[in-house]
Image: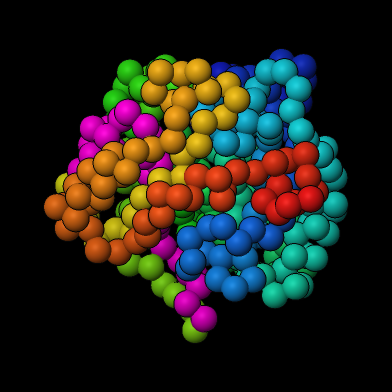
Amino acid sequence: MCPRECHADRSSARLGYCQTGTGFSIGSICAHMGEEPILSGRNGICNVFFTRCNMQCIFCQNYQISRNHGPIREHVLELDEVIEQIELILDSGVTTVGFVSPSHCIPQMKVIIAALAERKKSPTYVMNTNAYDKVETLVSLRGIIDVYLPDLKYMDKDLAVSYSDAPDYPEISTTAIKEMYRQCGADVELDGNGLIRSGLIIRHLVLPGHVENSRQCLQFIAQELSPTVYVSLMSQYHPTPSVVSHPNLGRTLYQSEYAAVLSEMERLGFKRGFTQALESPGSYLPNFVRLHPFEDP
């Protein structure tokens, strides 16, 4: 299913790298306003946060639900309960469903989409992924997923090893994103309200102390795909408790770092996409103890 190929038997106690079974372990299902404007619009996007992950980024802002070892915040639901929660949000006027960190839960994601179709629901489906995906898996999603929202994290293998326990991430992610580009191209389709209906948006989170890695990620997109691809360049990095003492990751970005990456973005000819204010780090931190992780209690 994923590049780990850990040969788990999820129907037994022999779970794999992500420690995920066959059921629906959900961190949250909520209407989220904090995504790119063409994703969330006025009403937000219905995001389904799966628990655990096929990567273990030491700085993950969703660490409360994404760790593969130790206690996490999770809701073990039946399919009908998942569908009911999604339908409540769709019935409020939301027209897009996003699956967050679904790379290790592709069967569950497909089942949810099929169940919604049986109930005559046809939202736009977004795969919000770390891009640690197999091409074969992505091929199986053609015609099912409308919008790919991958995060291209690293072109530096050493960073991929030390920060995410994924030494082959640069190779796997770039191959995966090339397949997403093959399916979608550079253009996006918008509806009458300016919301995305199909296409590709590549996210990149600029990490403190690693401007060169960010430059290399942008260079890959421009040179191997196209500078007309939509890119979301994020400055929202905020240290989580596990990295507050880290020599690089224990701080937010410097203005000069983000400016240097923006300059490279401009030099490469990118003109479509999104940037963030440098003051944004505190605005995107979730708390999965809350019923709605992105709203104040």
User: Per the image, is 160 magenta?
Assistant: no
Residue at 32%, 22% in the rendered image: 157
- Is residue 8 in view from this perspective? no
- Colouring convention used in this rendered image of the protein: rainbow
Residue 202 is a magenta residue: yes
The part of the chain drawn in magenta is 193-221
Residue that sits furthest to the bottom in the current view? 192
Which sits in the foreground, 277 or 220? 277
How many marks do you count on the picture?
Answer: 0
Q: From where the camera sits, is residue 68 visible?
A: yes
Image location (x, y in percent) of residue 208:
37, 32
The answer to which quarter of the image holds residue 87 is bottom right
Give the left or right position of residue 252, taking residue 16 as reference: left
Q: Vertically, is 239 above or below 110?
A: above
Measured from the top left, where is residue 293 in percent x and y? 71, 47
Q: Position of residue 19 (x, y in %)?
A: 68, 23
Viewport quadrant of the N terminus = top right
Residue located at (80% from left, 57% from top) = 85
Compare residues 78 and 156 and report the one nearer the observer: 156
Residue drawn 64% across and 58% down? 32
Image x and y of residue 206, in percent: 36, 39
* Corner quadrant of residue 9: top right
Most foreground residue, 31 or 228? 31
In the figure, is residue 79 to the left or right of 150?
A: right
Give me the residue at 29% from left, 26% from top: 156
Residue lying at the far left in this picture: please name it: 267
